[in-house]
Image (tube, rainbow, N blue to C red):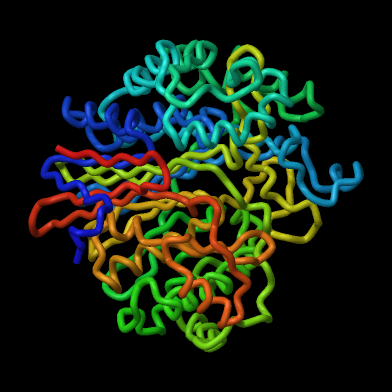
Amino acid sequence: MRDFHDPKRSPIYAANGALATSHPLATQAGLEVLKRGGNAVDAAVTAAAVLTVVEPAMTGIGGDGFALISKPGQPLYGLNSSGRAAAALSSEMLRGQGWQEMDDASAHSVTVPGVVKSWESLLESHGTIGLDAALQPAIHAAEDGFVVYPRVWSDWTDCAAKLAAQGAGAKHYLIDGKAPKLGSIHKLPALAATLKVIAAQGARGLYEGAVAADIVAELRSRGGVMTEEDMANHSADPCTPVSAGYRDIDLAELPPNGTGITAQIILNLLERFDLSSLAPNSVERLHLELEAARIGYAIRDAHIGDPETMGVSVDALIDKAWAKGLSATIDPAKRNESLPPVDPNFQSDTIYLSCVDRDGMAVSLINSVFKGFGSGIVTEKTGIHLQNRGAGFRVADGHPNTIEGGKRPLHTIIPAMAMAGSKPRYCFGVMGGHYQPCGHSHVITNMVDFGMDPQEALDSPRVFWKPDGTLEVEPTLGQGVLDGLIAKGHKAAFSTSAIGGGQIIEIDHDAGVLIAGSDPRKDGCALGY
């Protein structure tokens, strides 16, 4: 139960529709669509497009997109619009050039942008408006300017050196070599012009013609091998979500090449423990979560990649009988030192949004450019910053995630939907690079095991590890928790930055009410009506 003496955010309650994003301008734009009679997909795509303008370190039309949609009376719908590596690229070629691992600033790390095709596909299959209408608020923000918010400014500042080193990055995204000032109004005229082309021509305005040619020319000038044919061949592919039970809900995630099943593996392990008997911010609860996550991520790193090259089936990886045996390796008293460290390459910058409309359609949508401003490579004419999702590939041969031409890399961005029977109960997602599967398990157990509302579940302090395995502990947990985790064998220190973000909308079908939360770690905003 919420303590009203604790000055944290309250959740948003709504009867007709709700939208939660990582930025107030995006939430406002999407809510206006709902109020005008648009549905959840219309609002979600509109908001996502605005985010590519006002939160550019996290997302952009040079990135990728995934979505889950629940529509009353229909099966869950999944969409994977992650881009593929250039057809001419191969691990053999990179190894021949002396590569041992991917370079996240190289043109070879840039995969075909998938997000624009995802928007068009979602609108065509489930929306009521066209891509031209959905892009208008984003075009307005880019052309007329937008105010730079605090978290956006911080992320932009962190990426200024990366942008300055890449030529057109400074031209389009910096002012005198620096990020725009906090609270200033910033315009992106080249991006506005590009969005207008896409609004007029549809997704082919990005994947064919002058915009595609500009992307390819920029990459090839930097030694890349992407072609206009690679761009034109991109597809947004419907896929069947994977469901796994946890207590009284079924958690639906997208299948690989995404890592959503990692969250299901973690929850399969945690289900063997009576979490509700523990305090939610206790050393005991956090230790169990971390140990389950370490096992889940070790499984991810060994087995998950493009499904066409995986050697183990999804069903086998989320099998509860297998999880029962694995859970026996978790010692509530101490850290298991035998697990391997997680792959350090999966740190990403991402936006997530959740939307539910008056008719009960729920949309869980996530877009990303991977690391801050992606590769840092920005197109000269069209002002598009290009993702470096290919940095998640491996160069060594014989792994399901080894880089090859036309292949999709393992993806950290994962939208989710928790179902109660055939109806959605929580439409949610968590940002934060490779924290996301652990974040899914954290907020789900917060709500299912500890009875938190969506805002409480997001406010709840977090713990996760850095690439070297050292735990980052959000300071609000206090010295006692830090000391307790160290006593259980974890190397740990207080974090100097927030861990991830997130949005959640809970659907109370009995009361006919939506309950929305947004993460204060970002400039998050939830609104309803």
397 vs 264, left or right, is right
The percent position of residue 231, horizontal first and vertical second, equals 62, 27
- Horizontal and vertical percent position of residue 174: 60, 20
Residue 401, image quadrant: bottom right
Residue at figure coordinates x 51%, y 79% from the top left: 484
Q: Quadrant of residue 123?
A: top left
Residue farthest toward the left in the current orientation of the protein: 511
Between 401 and 230, which is closer to the camera in this rendering?
401
Residue drawn at point x = 80 percent, y = 57 percent: 397
Q: Position of residue 514 (x, y in %)?
A: 17, 49
Query: Would you say 449 lies left or right of 16 here?
Result: right
In the image, is residue 126 above or below residue 131?
A: below
Percent position of residue 27, x then y: 30, 33
Instruction: Give the side of residue 295 with respect to residue 398, left or right.
Output: left
Q: Foreground: 484 or 64?
A: 484
Say which residue appears at 60% left-offset and 30% top-offset: 233
The quadrant of the image that shows the N terminus is bottom left
Residue 409 shows in this picture: yes
